[in-house]
Image (cartoon, rainbow, N blue to C red):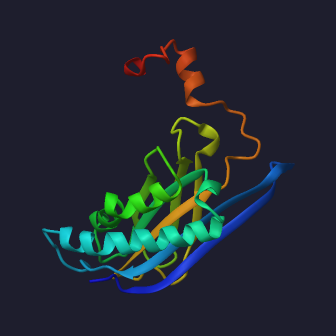
């Protein structure tokens, strides 16, 4: 059983000037979203696992392949994340189900050589609802320069009986980041950074 995909949407932006100052190198953020029929729409289903097992792997593999094609390579992606939006006849649980499984996420994680978990959002909305994909550094969850959000909308999705399943990525952090990172805050607060249990 494969998901019924109505269409695939690609989002890509390249920032040359940020905050009235040219970026040292173009800053790209991009995403790929699949609009699929929600297999649980309009009814309560106790066991979601059969569809998770059937839909998660092909969606994860297909979206990952498209992300790598956009980026040029897995190494080019420094920040990454995922998101799902469920239509109005679905539950937030349905949005969560297909992206919060290693059978979906591991394709992307392994393709970019990541160590961090994939940041995420799962929301409900109608057509043209925002698709917000929070990103973080793929190897360092405390690197604030790579705390980013990709946001776009699809005018005709999700329909009430659909799900939008998306992956996002960026080739770098904010061009002129200057707020430090989490580790400096912890050090300033007196935490022992050599002792992970103390953090």
Q: Specify the farthest residue to the left.
A: 46
Q: Is residue 91 above or below residue 7?
A: above
* Residue lying at 26% horizontally and 80% vertically, measured from the top left: 39
Q: Quadrant of the N terminus?
A: bottom left
Count of marks, rendered view: 0
Q: Can residue 129 be seen in this snapshot?
A: no
* Residue lying at 53% horizontally and 38% vertically, measured from the top left: 140
Q: Can residue 149 be seen in this snapshot?
A: yes
| Apparent side of residue 86 relative to residue 34 in the rendered image (left or right) | left
Image coords of residue 37 (percent x, y): 35, 83
Observer-nearest residue: 100 or 87? Answer: 100
| Apparent side of residue 18 relative to residue 109 in the rendered image (left or right) | right
Image coords of residue 162 (percent x, y): 37, 80
* Residue lying at 45% horizontally and 51% vertically, measured from the top left: 118
Observer-nearest residue: 78 or 190? Answer: 78
Q: Is residue 181 above or below residue 175?
A: above
Image coords of residue 115 (percent x, y): 47, 44
Q: Quadrant of the C terminus?
A: top left
* Residue lying at 55% horizontally and 62% vertically, measured from the top left: 168
Q: Is residue 44 above or below residue 196?
A: below
Which quadrant holds residue 144? top right
Which quadrant holds residue 84? bottom left
| Apparent side of residue 50 relative to residue 148 in the rendered image (left or right) | left
Image coords of residue 41 (percent x, y): 26, 79
Q: Is residue 139 above or below residue 36?
A: above
């Amino acid at each position: 059983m494969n998901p019924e995909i109505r269409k695939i949407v690609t989002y890509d932006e390249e920032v040359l000037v940020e905050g009235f100052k040219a970026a040292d190198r173009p800053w790209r953020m991009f995403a790929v979203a699949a609009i699929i029929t929600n297999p649980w729409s309009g009814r309560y289903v106790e066991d979601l696992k059969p569809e998770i097992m059937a839909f998660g792997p092909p969606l994860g593999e297909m979206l990952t392949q498209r992300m790598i094609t956009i980026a040029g390579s897995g190494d080019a992606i420094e920040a990454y994340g995922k998101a799902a939006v469920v239509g109005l006849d679905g539950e937030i649980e349905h949005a969560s189900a297909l992206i919060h499984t290693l059978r979906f996420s591991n394709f992307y994680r392994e393709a970019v050589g990541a160590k961090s978990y994939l940041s995420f959002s799962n929301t409900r909305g109608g057509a043209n609802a925002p698709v917000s994909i929070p990103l973080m550094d793929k190897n360092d969850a405390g690197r604030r320069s790579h705390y980013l959000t990709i946001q776009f909308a699809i005018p005709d999705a999700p329909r009430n009986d659909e799900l939008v399943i998306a992956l996002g990525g960026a080739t770098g952090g904010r061009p002129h980041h200057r707020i430090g990172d989490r580790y400096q805050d912890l050090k300033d607060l007196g935490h022992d950074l050599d002792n992970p249990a103390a953090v």
